[in-house]
Amino acid sequence: GAVVSQHPSRVICKSGTSVKIECRSLDFQATTMFWYRQFPKQSLMLMATSNEGSKATYEQGVEKDKFLINHASLTLSTLTVTSAHPEDSSFYICSALGGNSPLHFGNGTRLTVT
Amino acid sequence: GENVEQHPSTLSVQEGDSAVIKCTYSDSASNYFPWYKQELGKRPQLIIDIRSNVGEKKDQRIAVTLNKTAKHFSLHITETQPEDSAVYFCAASISAGGGNKLTFGTGTQLKVEL
C-alpha cells in the first residue's frame, strides 16, 4: 500500500532554533500534502495544505512566517518550525493525497523545544 | 467551513461488547467520511470509510452508518477486543481526493476492559 515517510520521528531542540521536518510519499505522487499538529489527548489540527509547485494555504491562526512549508516536488514536502519556542512542542504529522486514493499519514514527529 | 463533532470523548466497554461512536457534520456538501484509529504516539490508521452514496458499510467487526439527511455517521465495533483500545477519529471532507482537506472530530478514547 501507499507509504508516507516522515523524518525525523523525534527531535529535541533549544528555544530559538529552527527545525525541519520532511514528509515523503514513497510509492505515489502526492499532488497535495497536509500538515497537522496534535497536542496531547487532542485531535489533529490542520495547519496548512501544500500543493506541489505553489504556495501553501495556511489555516486561520497558523503563522506562515513561523511554519515554513515547501512542496518542491510531487514526493517531498518540508515543514520548518522557525525560532521554535516551548509552546511549539507538539506532535507534527503530515499526510499525502495522490489522485483519488485515501489520505495516508506519516509516522509523525515528536518535537520538544527546551 | 466544516465542523465535525464527535461523541463520546471516552468510552469504556467490556471485552466482547459492542462500541458505538457518533459524529455529526455541518457542511451538507461533505461526501466522504473516513474513520481513523490512532494508538499512542503513532500515526492515524484508516480503518473504514464511507461515501455519501452509501448508507452502510461493513468490514468484519467494523461497520459505519451514514445518515445524510441528519448529517451524522457512526462507527460500530462488535465483539470488541483489548487490541481495539485506542483513540478513534471521525472525519469529513468534500471528496476523497482532489486536494480537499479533512476536518477531524475531537476523538474518542476507547478502552476495552478484560
Image: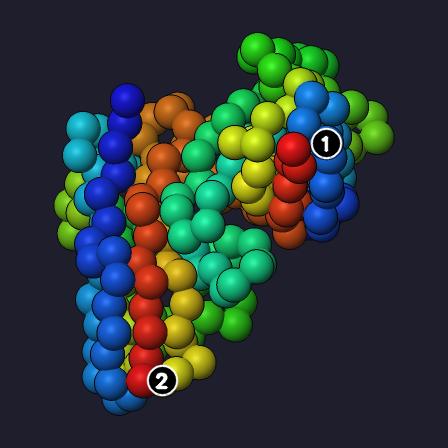
Could you classify mark 1 by the number of other residues whose Cα lies within 10 Å: few (under 14), some (14-19), or many (20 or more)? some
The kind of secondary structure element at disc 2 is loop
What residue does disc 2 label?
Answer: A85
Residue B74 position in % (x across, y down)? 72, 29
Residue sitting nearer the eye, B6 or B72: B6
Residue B8 position in % (x across, y down)? 76, 45
Q: Is residue A21 left or right of residue B82?
A: left
Q: Which mark is residue B14?
A: 1
- Residue A15: name its quadrant: bottom left
Q: CA distance from mark 1 to mark 2?
A: 42 Å
- For the residues carrying marks 1 and 2, which lies nearer the camera in this image? 1
Q: How many discs appear?
A: 2
Residue A51 position in % (x across, y down)? 30, 47
Q: Quadrant of the C terminus of chain B?
A: top right
State the residue lying farthest toward the bottom.
A16
State the residue lying farthest toward the front.
B114
Q: Residue at x 67, y 18 (%)?
A: B79
Residue sitting nearer the eye, A65 or B33: B33
- Give the amino acid at mark 2: His
Asked whether the viewer can see residue B53, the reply is no
Q: Residue at x 72, y 41 (%)?
A: B12
- Residue A88: name its quadrant: bottom left
Query: Relative to A18, is B29 above or below?
Result: above
Q: Could you tell me which chain the residue with mark 2 belongs to?
A: A
Residue sitting nearer the eye, B40 or B49: B40
Residue A59 position in % (x across, y down)? 49, 62
Q: Could you tell me which chain the residue with mark 1 belongs to?
A: B
Q: Residue at x 46, y 70 (%)?
A: A62
Residue sitting nearer the eye, B97 or A84: A84
The kind of secondary structure element at disc 1 is strand
- Give the amino acid at mark 1: Gln
